Image: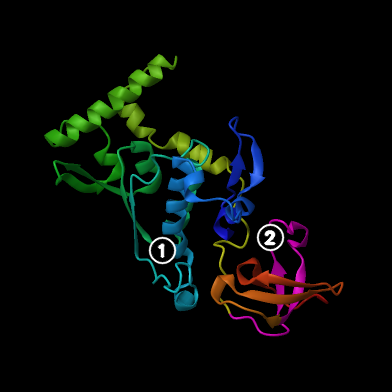
């Protein structure tokens, strides 16, 4: 739920208009895997793989995302055709999450046929043919640019890919460019779409792994049904039940209201107000 909210996912209708809150949708007890579309299931699988990458390494043992088992720190995230089944409005958000994973220090190993996805995510590339490395590793821009110096398998794939790109652009009424020009612009449109997305929440990755004690000042964020409390400060009164991100903490607002809030919706704040 927290990852959905932080990443700006929303529930949309057939026309792409927002019709619901993604975290609230995920909490719907009547929602089962069978009720999800293929793209929604794919998104769930993607988020389950990405979420441990944001778990603070020193708190991993106390963050029971998968039942009683807690994920160890993630050194390498393997993305094998990870973006293929996603809707057009979801794909850029997932690519942005993958970039956040990369920025957090986790290495990405991406298996894909889409040059634009690879251009967004990868620094170096390898061409694989027949289950074997045909060429590489080399800088991505060098490997995907048409060149007579490429090995046969690489040259055949790269040339065919950019020729198909040229034909599709021409069919859509765009001026035809050379394969080298398309290769030079690889990923540019995806980067523009990602840059146009609403900014991620200022807190960064959605887990504050620090322990909370009675009297600590916290800020509430990420609530769905009770979103009116988001942004408000409170003091920790007591812990209730659970552990890790799912633990419920009793907090008291400045006006005297007492709430039970999951730990993942609380962030430690400086004690500068009379909360």
Count of labels shown? 2
Residue 182, relative to residue 2: is it above or below?
above
Sort mark 2 into few (<14), some (14-19) or many (20+) by Cα contacts within 10 Å.
many
Picture quadrant of residue 241:
bottom right
Confirm whether the magenta stretch covers residue 207. Answer: no
Residue that lies at the very extreme toward the bottom in this rendered image = 214
The magenta segment: 211-237
Q: For mark 1, what is the residue? A: 105
- Label 2, on which residue? 223
Does dot 2 land on a helix, a strand or a loop? loop
Q: How is the image coloured?
A: rainbow
Q: Position of residue 55 (x, y in %)?
A: 48, 68
Q: Position of residue 91 (x, y in %)?
A: 47, 41
Look at the image and say whether residue 212 sits in the magenta stretch.
yes
- Locate residue 150 relative to residue 46 in the image: left or right: left
Q: Nearer the viewer, residue 46 or 170?
A: 46
Between 44 and 271, the one lying in front of the other is: 44
Residues marked 2 and 1 touching at CB (< 8 Å): no
Earlier along the polypeptide chain: callout 2 or callout 1? 1
In percent of width and height, residue 189 lies at: 47, 34
Residue 94 in view of the camera: yes
Query: Regarding mark 1 in the picture, which secondary structure is present there?
Result: loop
* Residue at the image point whose x is 58% and y is 58% from the top: 1
């Amino acid at each position: 739920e927290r990852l959905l909210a932080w990443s700006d996912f929303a529930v949309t209708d057939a026309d792409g208009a927002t019709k619901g809150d993604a975290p609230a949708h995920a909490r719907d007890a009547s929602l089962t895997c069978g009720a999800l579309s293929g793209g929604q299931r794919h998104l769930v699988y993607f988020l389950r793989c990405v979420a441990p990458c944001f778990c603070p390494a020193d708190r991993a043992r106390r963050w029971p995302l998968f039942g009683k088992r807690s994920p160890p720190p993630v050194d390498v995230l393997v993305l094998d055709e990870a973006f293929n089944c996603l809707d057009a409005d979801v794909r850029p958000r997932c690519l942005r999450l993958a970039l956040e994973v990369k920025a957090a220090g986790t290495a990405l190993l991406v298996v894909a046929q889409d040059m634009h996805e690879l251009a967004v995510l990868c620094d170096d590339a390898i061409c694989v043919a027949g289950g074997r490395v045909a060429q590489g590793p080399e800088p991505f821009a060098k490997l995907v640019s048409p060149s007579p110096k490429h090995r046969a398998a690489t040259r055949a794939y790269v040339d065919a890919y950019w020729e198909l790109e040229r034909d599709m652009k021409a069919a859509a009424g765009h001026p035809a460019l050379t394969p080298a020009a398309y290769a030079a612009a690889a990923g540019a449109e995806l980067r523009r779409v990602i840059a146009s997305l609403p900014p991620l929440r200022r807190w960064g990755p959605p887990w504050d792994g620090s322990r909370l004690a009675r009297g600590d000042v916290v800020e509430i964020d990420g609530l769905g049904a009770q979103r009116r409390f988001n942004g408000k400060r409170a003091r920790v009164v007591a812990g209730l039940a659970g552990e890790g991100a799912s633990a419920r903490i009793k907090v008291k607002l400045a006006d005297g209201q007492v709430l039970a809030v999951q730990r993942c919706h609380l962030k430690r704040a400086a004690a500068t107000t009379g909360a």
